[in-house]
Image: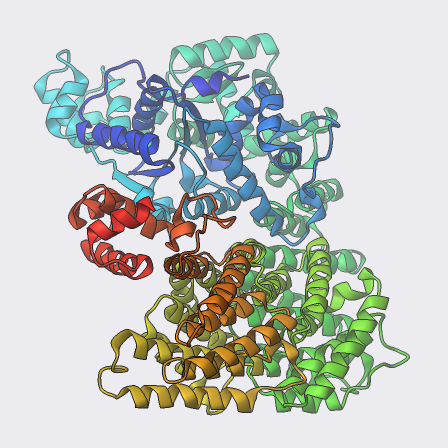
């Protein structure tokens, strides 16, 4: 069962490797880097037959000698749609042999989750664990949990000794495997793990080619080219004449596999050498006996790695004859033994064998395999590949198998699900009897395409469904139009979404009928997204609160849309009243009545967050997210997760916010939705910034702003505001001020919500006060008085914007006033900050209350006999920052306490990543600081961390500021404190 771990099936393994010294050096370097620095990603890139697999074999041998666990898998040309086939090929036998050990290492919950993909971990009725099953989450984003679980599994398998995970031929990998690779290079597993992949550049999708670059300094790409003429002579050996060797080199172009195939044809005249690699292989196959060729063809149809019994069924040959044929195939090196199974020596050999069989015979072979698997009771997912290749038009059983297989893999492999649904639709008749079933499958297909990241295909399928529906089937046409509009929105095509809805409404004899309400609700949402709240309100004003012919849940949906336009119009009392009404309706409605209207309910959740009703917002975000998961509404789920993260940030629950925002980002990437990614990255930017990781915050903010989607809409402005806040928090005050002003449109018809505008005023006042404190002359072109006056103007604007009916935001105006007064009147500044701390604490904004206490403490230091109160404020602030996970703010507060003679410790905010939180440094800044403390120069640090010298200098300037030192010696001293 575990034979595959010992080494791959590769051509020429026994023969010494010719040339490739640079490649071997690179392989050894990647191994050493993995041992020294943890996860590394290595991509071998080359044309078919260039020797990628041979080099991976050398890497496997190196890993075995170095004590790593080497595991090998490969994707297959004829099974590209099978989910996670390369990962299963690499890991499953290893997991099967160590099931109990692995379950203990990853936990029963993750083991149960993983068993949905890896049969080797199936426990056959063990404890279910604490992870929800893949099948329970129909959003398609369950695969993010799966990828995270596989990442943890890989780290657990590595242990202290290390793991080499090889995935060959990933240009044929399914979408799930590719998504996992994309996930793992951005979220590396723990421990010494080297992941090596190989692919053909001409056949690889762009996302494959970007993997090594996406891994950053952990990524390495190795180009595998042809052998030189001298290396070809060495490869052929002294038994081949120089003239024939030259002819073979010229015919093969130095391609090792083609060269080997030609070299096998020792009796062929050089003028008659086959012109292509496949032609050479066909000549090789021509020397097989008819029985051996038949079994080889059956095996090529069966699987990339096959058992003799399945080959016998496909070939219609007795088992004894099959084994005899396999002996011949092994002797001729067509296939190679892999434990109790067999595999072709190279994918090109399998392709040549497969294509040597007649198309009609292949169809029959697939059908025989289907019948055999059905007789064994094999699951639909095992049969589907062969059913797809053998099913005939109108074959109801084939349709049933494909649909069952599609539904079985939707949660973790929606692209495969969509593929099998399309195959089922191709076999279904398009007549009246089958019409209803066909329409239902098309809706299912549209959904599977959407959650797999193929939004344009999902939109096109939904439009085709709309075309097929009868003109007077208004309820179903309304639903289909709403789905189309949602997908157009995810594709950043809001104008097309609006036009589609208006066109469909114009077809209805009564645009105010119940069937029209869902589309009118979508129009309200579209208007709110583009900050046209008047248009949204105008549509809502024409909609009743309820009607006798409305579907269950529709009244909740309409009520959920009402708070946001009222808040935007400044009708705070109405907004609060509408939120209260909608909340009560939502509490009384069962989940099944909500699933159809989650896009509307999401607006209630966001409105409650903007209103500062954080407890209600979290309750509703969580409930809506649970319904979205169970009903497969992934593009709404990512939005709900982003809103939940925003709410948690406001409450200072940064660790929870970070996990939620990360899930939202990963979900948006899986969907390939620019809009949802911007929503999610905005929250990551804010979470990381307040947590103290300036680099991560600015990376997320830059990506969100530069996605180039959502121009003129509220979420795009919010992304720019988050980036501005991150710049200010990173100490880049002038840039941050400009970015925040730009996001607020300089407060002329701003597109941000009132609460964010109020926070922006406080941020601007703080930045101007900090600029003044930093330079002593404002920006360098103005006096202190002018800079102070500008901060005072922001404080005054905050006072005008503050609404006492929204207690969660009461306190920002006082805090802004404290910033403005900080230099010229410390006593008044302290009093204002103390007032702000009380208000913000009452409004559940703990992190902001801590910032107010920090401001008050610093201000008290400038007042007579203020040191005692300063210590009290700073201690309270440090405790809040510690509980919130605001590492940089906690470190800054503790430095002030040390100056006052107060002994402080590292605190509870220290997390995986060492002492970075204690010093207020980001993980990368701590890496730089430690190397500087060791005495390395900037150039040496840059080489060690794969950075530019300029980047090291930038990090060092921030380290100096955060540690409040002015020299490299000071850095070393500070780290020893």
Residue 545, quarter of the rendered image: bottom right
Quarter holding residue 930: top left
Q: Which residue is outermost to the left?
A: 242
Q: Nearest the camera: 578 or 515? A: 578
Query: Farthest residue in the front direction?
Result: 865
| Colour pattern | rainbow
| Residue 372 in sight here | yes
Q: Residue furthest right?
A: 548
**879 sits left or right of 598 in the view:** left
Q: Residue 485 at what x, y percent from top left?
A: 62, 73
Q: Is residue 376 left or right of residue 767?
A: right
Give the camera-side residue of 977 and 86.
Answer: 977
List x then y, in percent, for residue 408.
Answer: 69, 42
- Residue 127's x, y, as percent? 74, 31
Measured as percent of width and height from the top left, residue 906 is found at: 45, 48
Total residue callouts: 0
Residue 881 sits above or below residue 40 on the image: below
In the rendered image, the quadrant that contains the N terminus is top right
| Residue 356 visible | no
What residue lies at 27% left-to-right and 32% top-to-bottom?
Answer: 50
Q: Is residue 632 left or right of residue 154?
A: right
Q: Residue at x 76, y 72 (%)?
A: 470
Give the residue displayed 45% in from the left and 46% down from the top. 187
Q: Nearer the viewer, residue 355 or 949?
A: 949
Instruction: Please tell me in which quadrant of the rendered image residue 399 appears.
Output: top right
Left or right of 568? Residue 573 is: right
């Amino acid at each position: 069962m575990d034979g595959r771990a010992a080494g791959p099936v590769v051509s020429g393994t026994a023969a010494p490797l010719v040339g490739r010294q640079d490649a071997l050096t690179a392989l050894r370097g990647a191994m050493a880097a993995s041992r020294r620095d943890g996860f590394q990603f290595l991509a071998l890139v080359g044309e078919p037959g260039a020797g990628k697999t041979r080099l991976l074999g050398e890497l496997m041998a190196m890993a075995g000698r170095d004590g790593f666990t080497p595991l090998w898998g490969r994707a297959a040309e004829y099974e590209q749609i099978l989910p996670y086939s390369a990962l299963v090929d690499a890991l499953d036998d290893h997991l099967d042999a160590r099931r109990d050990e692995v379950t203990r290492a990853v936990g029963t919950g993750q083991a149960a989750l993983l068993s949905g993909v890896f049969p080797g971990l199936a426990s056959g009725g063990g404890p279910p664990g604490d992870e929800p099953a893949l099948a329970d989450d129909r959003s398609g984003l369950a695969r993010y949990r799966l990828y995270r679980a596989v990442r943890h599994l890989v780290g657990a398998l590595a242990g202290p000794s290390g793991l080499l995970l090889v995935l060959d031929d990933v240009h044929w990998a399914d979408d799930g495997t590719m998504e996992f690779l994309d996930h793992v290079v951005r979220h590396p597993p723990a421990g010494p793990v080297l992941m090596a992949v190989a692919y053909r550049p001409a056949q690889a999708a762009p996302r494959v080619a970007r993997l090594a670059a996406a891994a950053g300094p952990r990524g390495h790409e190795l180009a595998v080219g042809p052998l030189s003429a001298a290396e070809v002579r060495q490869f052929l050996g002294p038994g081949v004449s120089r003239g024939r060797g030259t002819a073979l080199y010229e015919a093969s172009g130095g391609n090792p596999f083609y060269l080997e195939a030609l070299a096998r044809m020792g009796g062929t005249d050089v003028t008659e050498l086959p012109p292509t690699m496949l032609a050479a292989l066909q000549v090789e196959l021509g020397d097989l006996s008819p029985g051996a060729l038949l079994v080889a063809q059956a095996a090529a149809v069966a699987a990339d790695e096959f058992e003799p019994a399945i080959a016998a069924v496909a070939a219609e040959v007795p088992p004894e004859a099959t084994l005899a044929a396999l002996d011949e195939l092994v002797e001729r090196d067509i296939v190679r033994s892999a434990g109790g199974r067999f595999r072709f020596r190279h994918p090109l050999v399998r392709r040549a064998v497969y294509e040597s069989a007649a198309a009609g015979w292949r169809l029959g072979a697939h059908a025989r395999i289907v019948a055999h698997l059905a007789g064994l009771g094999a699951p639909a997912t095992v049969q589907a590949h062969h059913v797809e290749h053998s099913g005939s038009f109108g074959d109801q059983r084939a349709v049933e198998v494909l649909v069952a297989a599609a539904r079985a893999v939707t949660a973790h492999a929606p692209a495969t699900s969509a593929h099998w649904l399309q195959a089922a639709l191709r076999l279904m008749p398009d007549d009246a009897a089958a019409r209803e079933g066909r329409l239902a499958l098309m809706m299912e297909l549209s959904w599977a395409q959407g959650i797999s990241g193929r939004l344009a295909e999902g939109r096109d399928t939904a439009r085709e469904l709309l075309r097929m529906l009868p003109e007077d089937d208004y309820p179903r046409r309304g639903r289909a139009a709403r789905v189309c509009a949602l997908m157009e929105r995810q594709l950043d095509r809001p104008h097309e979404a609006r036009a589609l809805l208006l066109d469909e409404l114009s077809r209805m004899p009564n645009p105010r009928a119940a069937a029209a309400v869902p589309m009118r609700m979508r129009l309200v949402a579209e208007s709110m997204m583009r900050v046209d709240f008047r248009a949204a309100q105008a549509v809502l004003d024409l909609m009743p609160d309820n009607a006798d012919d409305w579907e269950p849940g529709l009244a909740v949906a309409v009520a959920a849309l009402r708070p946001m336009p009222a808040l935007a119009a400044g009708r705070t009392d109405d907004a609060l009243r509408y939120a209260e009404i909608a909340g009560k309706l939502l509490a009384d409605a069962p989940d099944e009545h909500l699933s159809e209207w989650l896009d509307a309910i999401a607006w209630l959740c966001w409105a409650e967050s903007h209103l500062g009703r954080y407890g209600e917002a979290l309750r509703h975000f969580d409930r809506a997210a649970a319904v979205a998961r169970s009903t497969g509404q992934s593009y709404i789920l990512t939005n709900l997760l982003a809103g939940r993260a925003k709410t948690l940030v406001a409450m200072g629950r940064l660790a929870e916010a970070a996990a939620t925002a990360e899930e939202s980002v990963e979900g948006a990437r899986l969907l390939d939705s620019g809009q949802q990614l911007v929503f999610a990255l905005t929250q990551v930017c804010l979470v990381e910034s307040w947590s103290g990781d300036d680099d991560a915050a600015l990376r997320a903010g830059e990506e969100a702003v530069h996605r180039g989607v959502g121009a003129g809409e509220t979420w795009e402005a919010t992304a720019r505001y988050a980036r501005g806040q991150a710049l200010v928090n990173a100490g880049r005050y002038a840039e941050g001020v400009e970015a925040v002003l730009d996001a607020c449109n300089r407060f002329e018809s701003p597109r941000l919500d009132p609460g964010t505008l109020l926070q922006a005023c406080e941020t601007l006042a703080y930045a101007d006060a900090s600029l003044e404190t930093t330079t002593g002359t404002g920006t360098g072109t103005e006096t202190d008085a002018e800079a102070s006056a500008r901060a005072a103007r922001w404080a005054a604007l905050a006072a005008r914007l503050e609404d006492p009916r929204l207690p969660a935001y009461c306190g920002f105006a006082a805090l802004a006033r404290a910033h403005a007064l900080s230099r010229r009147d410390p006593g008044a500044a302290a009093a204002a900050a103390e007032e702000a701390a009380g208000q913000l604490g009452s409004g559940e904004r703990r992190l902001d209350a801590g910032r107010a206490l920090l401001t008050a403490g610093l201000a008290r230091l400038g007042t007579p006999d203020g040191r005692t109160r300063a210590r009290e404020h700073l201690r309270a602030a440090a405790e809040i920052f510690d509980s919130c996970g605001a590492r940089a703010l906690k470190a800054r507060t503790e430095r002030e306490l040390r100056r006052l003679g107060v002994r402080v410790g590292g605190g509870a905010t220290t997390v995986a990543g060492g002492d970075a939180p204690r010093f207020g440094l980001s993980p990368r800044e701590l890496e730089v600081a430690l190397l500087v403390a060791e005495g390395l120069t900037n150039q040496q640090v840059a080489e060690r961390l794969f950075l530019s010298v300029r980047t090291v200098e930038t990090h060092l300037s921030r380290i100096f500021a955060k540690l409040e030192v002015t020299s490299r010696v000071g850095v070393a001293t500070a780290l020893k404190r």
